[in-house]
Amino acid sequence: METKPKIFWGWFIVLGAFLIMSINYGARYCFGVFLKPMADEFSWSRSIISLAATINMFVYSFGAVFVGRLLDRIAPRWIITVGATIAAGGYILASLATTPSGFYITYGLMAGLGSACLGVVVCTSSVGKWFVKKRGVAIGVTTMGISFGTVLLTPLAGYFVNFFDWQSGVLTLGIIIFLVAIIVSQILMRKTQPEAYDLLPDGDKIAIPHQAPLTQTVYSIPTLTILKDSRFWTLAVCQGLAVMVVMSVFMHQVAYAMDNGISKIAAASSLAAISITGFIGQFFYGWLSDRLADPKYASFLGISVMLTGIVLLINVHSIQGLYIYALVYGFGYGSLAPVAPIVIADRFGRHVMGSIYGLLTFFIGIGGSIGPILGGIIYDNCGSYRYLWLTNIFVLSGVALAILTLKKGKQYST
């Protein structure tokens, strides 16, 4: 009598990572919903409020360097549990903040540090270690969590802002992060890599040449070696500038829509619209990467679609226009999260993904931290967001061309 095969544990890692990324990034992208209400209540400028998001992103990226190194050595559940506690505390205390400095410490420092332990470095690197042949689909499904969480949480945040206050929305996000992240991580994110449990990547029964033997090995790559690799810098610049655009859009899009006479709930829901097509895009670009000779072409396509979306955004003056832009831009934005770790594994090897992605995220974070404050400064000095969107168009054009120059080179692990 045949025994029914067990589900490969890598798919449980995918599910856990999907849920962790849902609440982490869903909460982060709610920030734009709170921007205008906070400005109205405290009479703070948008650049003052946006600085909190900049600090959050910078701390997140700095923390990712150390988180990536840890991930190559210990099970992800402990990293996520500690991060969830810190991030949840940051959100809950941020709901009580009444001064810029208080908001910078709680949302900027605490939530930023905690979210580094719940982010793409931990989640996609954990998944990437369990798959080779199905890596694109597995990481694509994992990163769909970003859009899934944004679809769920941004309308929820908009509801609280509209019917209660921004403080209630921020408090609710903190509670959700604490409960979901700790429960999910302790149940589903307990294991490190298949070789440590006498398993093979993808659930294979027989080893193939590009798979490692059944041994528990810690792979280490010197930071200096990474920094001397031109491929790393191509990725760092391209991803950093792309995320700068993403963060500027997510932090200021809702306020921009409200400035154009669009209601609070409709403006907040435009973030959910981005995430609907982003959800589709995250699977599509992961699937596409498995079928192309080089995943960089999937990245080029995604950046090009994002660029088209920003061109539409600069001409938005109605709800209909806002949603058309959001759907187009979202499908392109969906390429960023899945393709980056796929390219890293393709170029450098899957066993050092944590270290490479952690260091890369630091440089991505520098770009991402510029986005929110750049938007606030441009608005405060120009009285509109037009020049921010023009800047984004120029940046994405350069990124699309630069990503095509990315070379293959050698892997540091197999």
Image (cartoon, rainbow, N blue to C red):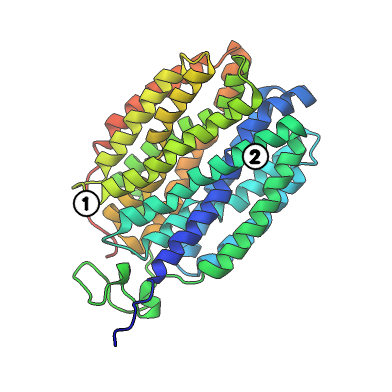
Q: How many marks?
A: 2
The kind of residue on which mark 2 rests is: Leu
Q: Position of residue 320 (x, y in %)?
A: 49, 19
Kindly identify the residue that appears in the image at 37 percent across and 34 percent down.
332
Measuring from the top left, give residue 184's x and y in whole percent. 57, 63
Question: In screen coordinates, is 68 left or right of 401?
Answer: right
* Residue 367 seen by the camera: no
Residue type at the position of mark 1: Gly
Q: Which residue is mark 1?
A: 409
Distance of label 2 from label 1 (alpha carbons): 46 Å
Position in image of residue 263 (x %, y %):
64, 21
Mark 2 surroundings: few (<14), some (14-19) or many (≥20) residues within 10 A: some
Give the vertical position of 68 relative to 159 (above or below).
below
Q: Is residue 44 visible?
A: yes
Instruction: Work out which quarter of the rendered image holds the N terminus and state it.
Output: bottom left
In this rendering, the answer to whether 219 lies above or below 157 is below
